[in-house]
Amino acid sequence: MTITLITGANKGLGFEAARRLIEEGHSVYVGSRDVKRGRAAAESIGGRFLQLDVTSDASVNAAAADIRRRDGRLDVLINNAGIGGGGGKPADVTAEDLEHVYATNVFGLVRVTHAMLPLLLKSEEPVIVNVASGLGSIGVVTDRSRLESSFPTLAYASSKSAVTMLTVQYAKAFPEIRINVVDPGYTATDLNGNRGHQSVTEGTDAIVKLATIDTDGPTGTFQDRNGTVPW
């Protein structure tokens, strides 16, 4: 059975990805900072609750130790946990705004990946899926025909751009792991006040696709549900 961990999985894209992957036969750890919500979410879909705060070394290391004790390996890591923030005019965004957003979106991803790498390297078909955004694509945000070009989200967009570069660097460093980054698209979640035009199922299409590849699958790519996304 494929052992999968999804961070930020108690709601939104993470929850839907967990539900779909459980249907695919994965044993899914539903990572959540909030114990009550995370446990309820996991129980509702037959997942395995894992208390996990991506901003805390102690929490992440404890989660890795728990997976090691229970399964001895990890096959799929989905770095989904993320926050918004730092919106408004770029002139009003402070360094503290970036620190707050990066703590989860960037440093949290690195913290979890670093802790889970030894477990992933014990898998026969290890996979990492990083959840970014079209707002993190320079090609997308400079294309005036794209909706993303009209959003002045300095902190969030730059954090997701960092995620795309982290993905490329990890993919180069670990050719034995299939490591890709996805743009879910403008999906209705709490992150955007449920204003997105896609359903969470549509938003998780690329996540699920890249979480279910084997050793012949792509690595170091940026994809959405329709195909390749420009860097």
Image (cartoon, helix red, strand yellow):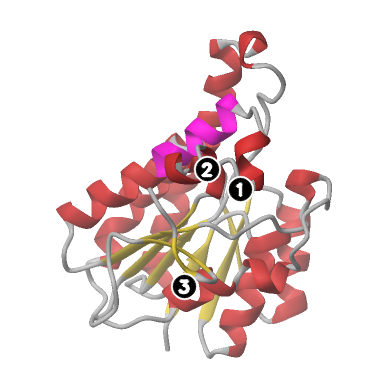
Above or below — where is 201 with respect to 66?
A: below
Query: Mark 1 vs mark 3: which is more N-terminal?
Result: 3
Q: Position of residue 210 (x, y in %)?
A: 43, 73
Left or right: residue 147 compared with residue 222 = right
Quarter of the view holding residue 220: bottom left
* Range of magenta residues: 154-163
The prevailing secondary structure element of the residues shown in magenta is helix
Task: Measuring from the top left, give residue 86's x and y in whole percent.
Answer: 66, 24
Q: Amino acid at mark 2?
A: Asp
**According to the image, label 1 marks what residue?**
146
Whether residue 150 is in magenta: the answer is no
Residue position for label 3:
4
**Within 10 Å of the Cα at label 1, are there few (<14), some (14-19), or many (20+) other Cα atoms?**
few
* Crowd around label 3: few <14 · some 14–19 · many ≥20 (10 Å): many
Give the labeled residue for mark 2. Answer: 143
For the residue pair 139 and 17, the one nearer the viewer reads as 139
Q: What element does badge 3 sit on?
A: strand
Seen at 72% across and 67% down, the residue is: 200
Instruction: Please identify, in this view, whether the residue under mark 1 or under mark 3 is nearer the observer.
Output: 1
The residue lying toward the viewer, choosing from 86 and 10, is 86
* Label 3 to label 2: alpha-carbon separation: 35 Å
- Nearer to us of marks 3 and 2 is 2
Query: Is residue 205 visible from the viewing direction of this image?
Result: yes
Q: Amino acid at mark 1?
A: Arg
